[in-house]
Image: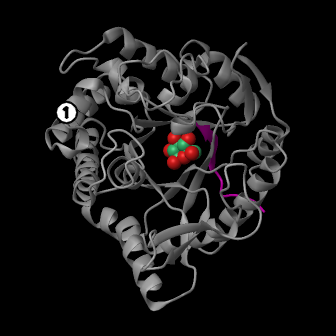
Amino acid sequence: MNFPKGFLWGAATSAYQVEGGIDNNDWARVQAMPKPGLACDHYHRFAEDFSIAKKLHHNAHRLSLEWSRIEPEEGRWDEAELRHYHEVLEFLKQNGMMTFVTVHHFTNPIWVARQGGWANKKTIKDFEKFVAKISQSIGYLIDFWVTINEPNIYANLGYMSGVWPPFNKNIIKAYLVYRNMLEAHDKAFEIIHNYYPKAQVGFAQNFSWRRAEEESYLEKLFIKFINWLTYDFPYRRTRNDFIGVNHYTDIHLKLSLWSKNPIAFRKHPGPASERGWAIHPHAIFQVLNKLKNLKIPIYITENGLADAKDEKRGDYIRGYLSEINRAIRDGVDVRGYMHWSLMDNFEWEDGYKWKFGLVEVDFKTQKRTIRESARVYAEICKNNAV
Ligand code: BGC
């Protein structure tokens, strides 16, 4: 099964998860969370890592910028850090890779967190200044702008379930944070287009496939509501040159109104990753099909699994890409695929527990080892076919 000509193939990472040495953001400062320390030391080893990606026939890469490095204090720009990202992006371009740059991937500088983070409208203004600075300085090296990573997950984990900084449990705040992030994306869209009229700007949304476990009227209604919040609301309020799809799994919603846990999510039955997320490739076809009527080009900005022994990753990649290919033949305009992740990395509240990498990293020696599944994926990239 061939992919359209010019299809982009690559992998994704995010700054806090791979760079190492970041200690000026909200995640680094809260006691309750594990710390990445040196992580993959990607800050110093990016050339080695991207050379591996190139060898594996990737023609694109998605990375994120660490706001706390670039603007450690409000209004103070660290030119050395901008030069660093300049070097990183230039290396990718010189090696013939397209750049996907995420401007915000979950972490905030301390000063942003202190002013109330994304619950404070001022943060939108600060983000706009950050985006303008990036546009002026390194923007010409950015092919695809992913303004914000997963506003839906960020609002949910930080402000609903409250398991991520700033550990709030306030449904109204969660809604406001989601809305503020979408507004910030839309403002960023305009700023970037003022600098680069032909820029490609979008944001990455998490699209798990969701279904009603018992198909009761209430469950179906609830799914309709969450789907509206995920698929409709954000794209009605914002402008987008593309939709960034982060997709991992398929979940069932179970409502039991009179129990202690009235709203529960369960995994789709069948095979699962080490993290317990269902492996069900058809789910991505369903997500893509649902997005089809928005008539906006789609890039898969994340898809992958935790699999330390690399037993399932090869088949996972083949399976998901076959379904993506089927969606394309069905008329969905998918133009690229970034696997999560290029290498094992720091997995947020779970530290180094999960191994998502095409490339294995030994965190003691920093040695990189290419996994077998990375070679399966490399063949697909090389042939532009699965
Ligand atoms: C996030 C990544 C994370 C991945 C796996 C995604 O929602 O964007 O940062 O590593 O999930 O948990």
165 vs 39, left or right, is left
For label 1, being within 8 Å of ligand 1 is answered: no
- Residue 219 shown left or right of residue 347 in the figure: left
At x 31%, y 67%, the residue is 233
**Who's the residue at 40% across and 84% down the image?**
221
Front in this rendered view, residue 169 or 48: 169
Q: Which residue is mark 1?
A: 126
Is 249 displayed left or right of 125 in the figure?
right
Which residue corresponds to the image point at 32% horizontal and 50% vertical from the top-left? Answer: 159
Q: Nearer the viewer, residue 30 or 327?
A: 30
Please state the horizontal and vertical placement of residue 44, each as a whole percent of the image: 57, 12
Is residue 296 magenta-colored? no
* Vertical side of 84 occupied by 223: above or below: below
What is the span of residues highlighted in magenta in the rendered image? 1-12
Residue 29 appears at what percent x and percent y?
A: 37, 23
Note whether residue 182 is visible: yes
* Ligand 1 picture quarter: top right
